[in-house]
Image (tube, rainbow, N blue to C red):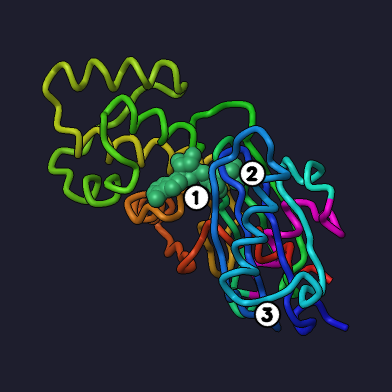
Amino acid sequence: MDGENMGYRIGLDLGSTAIKMALVRDGDLVWSRQTPTAPGQAGLARDLVSAALDELGLAEGDIAGVAATGYGKRLVGTAGRLVDEISANARGLFALSRGRCRTIINIGGQDLKVIRLTEDGLVDEFRMNDKCAAGTGRFFEQAARILDTPLESFARLSLAADQPLELNSTCVVFAESEMVSLLAKGVRRENIIRGLHHSVAKRVGHLLGHGLVSGEIYLDGGPAQNQGLLSALEDELMLEVKKLPQPQFTVAFGAAIQP
Ligand code: ADP
């Protein structure tokens, strides 16, 4: 039977920064939650499962399958199946976009991935940068600390920039000192944050390269919650970039529905 029509199924995405869980019923996302990654990941994943069962009034026997994905997937002993992140992401976004997605830009806590899909939703091409923190969620987290500004405000502030600037540093360590000196010179946070978004968008553009983009493009992963990043990407690529309402859960969703 197809994975999308098998009652309740759970997908656990054990990422570098957050553990995400999706509970799917007959192909629909019915419950999702995330918790920060910390030691004892199996226990944290179990707590998410218990919370979902409690809140939905379900018993363990009601769950037809549990699948784990993400870099910590092997830490969850109870998961019936292990799914690789790329397949989970492809399957999840293809299903949630109703078959329209052809390119995925996934930004996680510690990596940046580009996945190109065939018309049937299979992985056609895959590129990744996991060697350097620039262009990843970690870059935004460090910027949030330096600028003493919550990540949740980045979208609003970047869209309020009046004199966007270019960050010259291509490395996170140098970008940190660049941000500190810009602040010291009195440059507005709004303009620094917009510059930050553009530097990440440039990295994505390099990874995407030429000729890779055809069909609908979606941004997912935690940083996709930031509308300012989406706008910067659209400016950089000169293409429309879409996102789903809960972009941080597509990988967990895809693991859940993997047959
Ligand atoms: P991973 O799968 O590697 O754990 P995620 O896809 O969960 O990573 O993304 C984590 C990143 O998402 C964080 O490093 C942070 O930059 C970003 N992030 C998390 N919450 C928000 C938010 N509310 N707004 C913008 N960015 C966010």
Tell me the residue at 43%/43% (across/down): 201
Magenta segment boundaries in residue numbering? 78-95
Tell me the residue at 79%/68% (across/down): 258
Disc 1 element: helix
Is the residue under label 1 in contact with that under label 3 (CB below 8 Å)? no
Question: Does residue 51 appear anywhere in the picture?
Answer: yes
Q: Mark 2 points at which residue?
A: 15
Residue 63: give x, y in percent of width and height. Answer: 77, 73
Disc 3 element: strand
Q: Nearer the viewer, mark 3 or mark 1?
A: 3
Numbered label attached to residue 222: 1
**Which corner quadrant of the image does residue 180 belong to?**
top left
Q: Earlier in the sequence, mark 3 or mark 1?
A: 3
User: What amino acid is labelled 2 in the image?
Assistant: Gly
Residue 127: give x, y in percent of width and height. Answer: 68, 44
Residue 121 placement, left or right of 32: right
**Which corner quadrant of the image does residue 89 belong to?**
bottom right
Q: Does the residue labelled 1 lie within 8 Å of ligand 1?
A: yes
Q: Is mark 2 within 8 Å of ligand 1?
A: yes
Q: Earlier in the sequence, mark 3 or mark 2?
A: 2
Residue 219: give x, y in percent of width and height. Answer: 51, 57
Reply above or below: 169 against 245. above
